[in-house]
Amino acid sequence: MENHDIEKKMMSIVAEDGSVEEVEVILAFEFKDTKKEYVIYTKNEKDENDNITVYVSNVDRSSGDPKLMGVDDEEEWNRVKDVLRELSKAE
Amino acid sequence: MGDAINLIDRDYTTVKSDDRVSKNIIKTRKLSFKRIAERWAEFRLSLMNKELERAKENLVKDNYHVGTSGLSLGSEAKMNRRTAAVARLEEKIMILKREDVPTDYRKNRAIKLRNNMMANLTYNSANAYSVEEDKIDKVFEEEQASVVPETNEGENMAAVATSEDIDVEKVSAANEEKIADDVEKAMHEDVSREDISSVIDSKFADLEENANVGNFVSRDEVESAVQNAIDAVEEDSDTHEVAAEEVHENVSEQPVEDSERVHVSQNESTEAKVNHFDSEGEVKPREGYVPMTDDQIAEARRNIEYEKYEEIYKTLWEEKKKRFKDALQEIKNSAKRNIVPEVPMEEAVRDEVVVTPEREEKVEEYTTAKEEEKPKEDLHMDYTDATKRDVARAIGKETSVSGLAALKERALKLREEQENARKDQEAARREQVEEAERAMEIRRQTEAKKEAYAEKFRALEEYCAALEEDTKSIRSSAAISRNDTACNRRFIESRVAEMTDYDERIQEIDSIIDSPENGRSR
């Protein structure tokens, strides 16, 4: 199935200064053991080699509204990268 | 590595971002990006399709009760709600697949589904109406059915399933508008955040009252968790599970690289929650909040999915437990004490009571026999009626980790008991409503039978009267005939007598005329 056949899921990121940025969500998952939620999104930025930049954030919903947080822990970051590697493989 | 994930699809419409959030960036090759995005898109579509199948099943696999004129109130609301849910999901899938969606699709589709349902309902052995297996496909057809529902002839329920009782034919324009309004209301009730908020208010109030676990679970946390659960749509059973064995360190053909990362502190402060209560201690209504009606509340309560709540509470409890433990550790390790010594510390003897003249008196008070008889203080604290403040205060004194475990266990047990009690209550209510509907139905049928019998009786009476009248008439006619006959006989007799008399006289005259003495020659 081609990706363009499916409606994109857009996300509006509201910065502290109130500015809003529209991005496209391409993946969302949570780890079964920690229940931590992650969202992978893109602004459709490409570099000179046609590589696409994607952003990874932890989603914190503990305060009610969802909030994007960074992934600072090294081990956690490696786990996220592993997930993306695995999902990027051909089925 | 042993990692396992659940793919999820939650609400990301608007999210906040801290400017200090670390930029975890990855550069992906085109093909990798495409594969990742496709996997998630497939998951989203399959999730939606599963939800649609469940909604359809809910619609056609249930019993619907008939009231005095058409469906009972409860069954009508149930059908409206479920047809609206199917229409909503079908539309979402069409949007997801970028298909053309007709104008007012949801409303029109819900009406069609409702009409198809009404046309294919059949009376069943449970004294209710449902859709038979071989007619399920007809319900979801695009063509609108117009068949009168069958009745169970053996049950002699013809009086129930006539077209007078159930409007099974194509809905008139006026009724269609009313149905559309009901469906629209049901559609909005399905996903209104205010409704969710209101239901949670009432549920949370009950929880606070009955659980005796203090304020460990905040209302906002529950609301957020419930909304996430509703958006995720039974994520536990429907999310795509990547098994532990699948995720392992591997060098792929298209390696995923990370470029720059900016480390920032994780200690972002949480948003302070203020202004949730007024001066009387009552919860302030949210802006634009519209209180639900009793019917809406009852409907929302019936729709509460207890299994999701249970999962949510468990998750929140785990989070709170962690924080509580952290707080416990912090207090234990903290050197700070909000104690002002009565004498300069350098003059105080460690571990001894610092006695001032006034205090010495007080110390004596504490050494009475009564005090000595007092049983040794039990270090295990009873948190049965403890609030959060009580627990926090208790932490400052002596504390025990086992006390926390016991409290947690009690809280979980109480919560479980509460949920079971609620489920019982709801089940009892449902049963009560159903039995009441059934009683009304039986009463109506009995009245109908009684009326039919009375009518037949009257008809029979009239028939007897007519028979009697007719018999009288016939008898009268017969009597008249007999009378006529008698009269004629008498007439005949008298005439015969008269004739005989005349004959005799004629003979006498003839004998005179024809006598030889008269000398006539003949």
Image: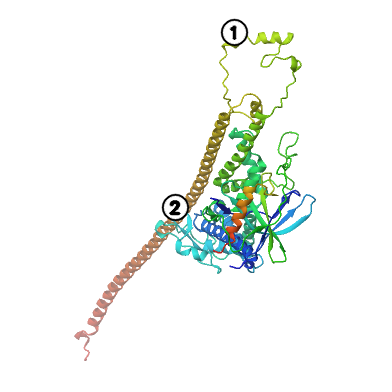
Within 10 angstroms of label 2, few (less than 14), some, or many (20 or more) residues?
Answer: few
Residue B410: image quadrant is top right
Residue B126: numbered disc:
2
In this picture, is B368 found above or below B399? above
The quadrant holding residue B38 is bottom right
Which residue, as the protein is rendered here, is positioned at the far front?
Answer: B251
For badge 2, the amino acid type reads Ala
The residue that label 1 is drawn on is B369
Given residues B197 and B62, the one toward you in this image is: B197
* Residue shown at the point (51%, 41%) measured from the top left: B424
In the rendered image, residue B331, in percent from the top left (x then y), is placed at: 67, 30
Residue at x 56%, y 64% (from the top left corner): A90
The residue nearer to you, when weighing B143 against B445, is: B143
Q: Is residue B313 above or below residue B12?
A: above
Instruction: Name the colour scheme.
Output: rainbow
The percent position of residue B93, horizontal first and vertical second, equals 60, 63
Compared to B251, does B223 lie above or below? above
Q: Position of residue A88 (x, y in %)?
A: 59, 61
Q: Position of residue B458 (x, y in %)?
A: 45, 55
**Callout 1: SS:** helix
**In front: B494, or B111?**
B111
